DNA sequence: TTTAAATATTTTACTATTAAAACAAACACA
DNA sequence: TGTGTTTGTTTTAATAGTAAAATATTTAAA
């Protein structure tokens, strides 16, 4: 123990980091709530559906179910349900993988691609508006910090 | 239109802010996943339960259901279910409000208080470890940015 | 080649989440 | 005093999320 007195500042670094985390959570939750609501109101869709479509848009050739859940960092069973509903609505297809009868590749349909491109551009505007307070330099500085944290988190676990 | 040329950098600020948002999400999701898993493994509880208990711990006198959902920024119905389960397990109680037979105040039980205090201190350690890369100055600088953003979000909506 | 282990996905059971509807009680006011 | 509106909470129906079990297939090993 380095501070044997009453309770002057027991572990300031730890308290500060906790405050940091609570601020981050507040910002993230607020932004996410706004984006969810706008996706619902303007496009009748949801954030997880948007996320799946975004991942598939980045990987034109499609992704296996397991790759999709790993990219999105959610469970396999979760992705199964979301993809089921996207298939129902004609935004994605499940394609059997030649040479491995267990696996399925999920891919955007043309309709899925067209709709996503439109939604993504509007979405970018929402995000930009929400972060309007941020100057480019400030954004860059904070991103550097977040990148370091993300990297250190990747190394753990 | 200010940039009538091909597509040199259509709206760089907007792209940068989008990247900022994706970094923030990644960090938040990773940290949240770790914390969820630890809460489950070490304490057999969940993040929403922890959040409710944290809110009630800050408000010793208890909170109405509606105040609770407003503090946590989740829907009324959501809180109903979480509180139901916390009541079942003896961590919180619903107390009728004198003078308004519609309302209920939710409060921590002694057991709830004791357990929360213990969990909260361990939780603080987890968060501190996850953010170990962050220097105090850096944390302070980033928090200032997040505070400005949180404030500007509060003003909108 | 049969068997065992690993892999890919889905299913199951449960908690969490929302929006909207349903209820009950309080309030406003003619 | 009714009666219509607002307020506080729960219920309902749907999607989302998890861990764990189940299934099917592939790979490895004996």
Image (cartoon, coloured by chain):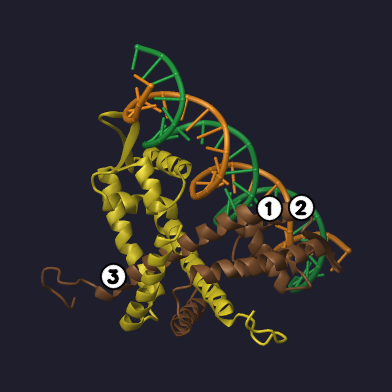
Chain colours: A brown, B yellow, C orange, D green
Residue at 48 percent of width and 83 percent of height: A136
Disc 2 from disc 3: Cα separation: 47 Å
Residue beneath label 2, please?
A89
Residue at 28 percent of width and 51 percent of height: B57
Residue beneath label 1, please?
A81
Q: Is mark 3 on a helix, strand or loop?
A: helix
**Mark 2 and 3 residues: CB-CB less than 8 Å, in contact?**
no
Residues marked 2 and 1, same chain:
yes
Residue D30 picture quarter: bottom right
Residue beneath label 3, please?
A15
Q: Quadrant of the N terminus of chain A?
A: bottom left
**Mark 1 and 3 residues: CB-CB less than 8 Å, in contact?**
no
* Viewer-side label of 2, 1: 2
Residue at 72 percent of width and 52 percent of height: A85
Q: Is mark 2 on a helix, strand or loop?
A: loop
Residue at 28 percent of width and 45 percent of height: B111
Q: What element carries label 1?
A: helix
* Viewer-side label of 2, 3: 2
Crowd tier of the residue under label 1, counting other residues whose Cα lies within 10 Å: few below 14, some 14–19, many 20 or above: few
Q: Does label 1 or label 3 sit earlier along the sequence?
A: 3
Crowd tier of the residue under label 2, counting other residues whose Cα lies within 10 Å: few below 14, some 14–19, many 20 or above: few
């Amino acid at each position: 123990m380095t501070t044997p007195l009453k309770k002057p500042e027991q572990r300031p670094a730890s308290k500060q980091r906790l405050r940091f985390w609570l601020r981050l959570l507040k910002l993230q939750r607020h932004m996410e709530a706004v984006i969810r609501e706008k996706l619902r109101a303007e496009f009748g869709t949801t954030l997880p559906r948007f996320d799946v479509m975004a991942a598939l848009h980045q990987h034109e050739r499609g992704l296996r179910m397991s790759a999709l859940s790993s990219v999105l960092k959610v469970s396999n069973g979760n992705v199964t349900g979301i993809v089921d509903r996207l298939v129902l609505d004609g935004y994605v297809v499940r394609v059997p993988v030649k040479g491995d009868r267990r696996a399925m590749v999920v891919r955007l349909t043309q309709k899925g691609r067209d709709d996503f491109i439109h939604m993504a551009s509007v979405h970018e505007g929402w995000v930009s508006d929400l972060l309007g307070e941020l100057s480019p330099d400030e954004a860059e500085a904070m991103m550097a910090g977040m990148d370091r944290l993300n990297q250190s988190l990747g190394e753990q676990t």
